[in-house]
Image (cartoon, helix red, strand yellow):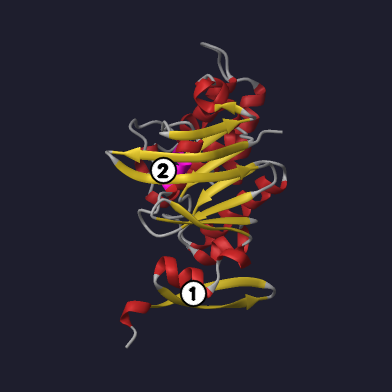
Amino acid sequence: MTVLSAQNVSVQLQNKNILNNIDLLIEPGELIGLIGPNGAGKSTLLRSLAGLISVNSGEVLLDNRPIQNIDRREIAKVVSYLPQSGQSHWSITVKTFVSLGRLPHRGPWSGLSITDENSINRAMETMDVAQFSNRRTTELSGGEFSRVMLARVWAGEPQVLLADEPVSDLDPYHMLEVMEHLKRLATQGAAVVVVLHDLTLAARFCSHLVLLSEGFVVKKGTPSEVLTTDHLADVYNINVISGDQVGLPYIIPWERLDQRV
């Protein structure tokens, strides 16, 4: 059982406080949404959890071990990080790109095993990109490449998945599909943390939410505890319309409060 946590984490970048005294426990079976306005610190928190940013104080722990003391290859076997708006710097086939997700599980100079091939093919089918197998990554649309990026992460079969705005470039059909897959991955025992701007997706799919503003945690808890009218007004400065459809919640940003007469 892989557990990732942030304990009293603060981060400064270019002499500016980005995160302030963040505590967060990420356990198997959870789909945690990081929400908040632009500049709230969501991406920085995600990169800190992945061990890609050194914290100024506090600790990020992977199974109770400081993540900065763990070999990167060992981390990569259990933790996958999906950056915001990733890109391919080389014109390679989609299957070759997705196969890179298996690198932490392969020995030096070794080819793809049957297990690797199965994981790659399963990930491509799951993310609906198998039909692109022989296409070049540079030939894909932004939405298509976003799904290919997710397939690469899926191929590594991570125990912890950290995804930064994975649905931002997708059409509504594939937005729902990706969120369903993230939810299923958590249900199967993985720990998933995802940065989201869509409040309805956050309310509908996440088991827990962390609302950030100016580097501080304003509220964390279940979607119903976090997505209150007062919290959304205080943090986003918006009024919303909310309700439920067949028992599932929706939240529609309706007006900026500073526009009200």
Q: Amino acid at mark 2?
A: Thr
Picture coordinates of residue 237, whole percent (x, y)? 39, 71
Picture coordinates of residue 238, whole percent (x, y)? 41, 74
Question: Can you tell which quarter of the image residue 247 is in?
Answer: bottom right
**Residue 228 shown left or right of residue 165 in the figure:** right
Mark 2 residue crowding within 10 angstroms, few (<14) / some (14–19) / many (20+): many
Q: Amino acid at mark 1?
A: Ile
Q: Which residue is mark 2?
A: 44
Magenta span has 91?
no
Question: Vertically, is 181 above or below 37?
Answer: above
**Residue 189 shown left or right of residue 213 in the figure:** right
Question: Can you tell which quarter of the image residue 106 is in?
Answer: top right
Q: Which residue is mark 1?
A: 252
Mark 1 residue crowding within 10 angstroms, few (<14) / some (14–19) / many (20+): few
Picture coordinates of residue 89, whole percent (x, y)? 33, 32
Question: Can you tell which quarter of the image residue 90 is in?
Answer: top left
Q: Which residues are magenta?
A: 43-47
Q: Residue at x 55, y 45 (%)?
A: 23
Q: Which mark is residue 136?
A: none
Question: Vertically, is 225 above or below 144?
Answer: below
**Residue 94 shown left or right of residue 106 in the figure:** left
Question: Vertically, is 25 above or below 180?
Answer: above
| Residue 127 in sight here | no
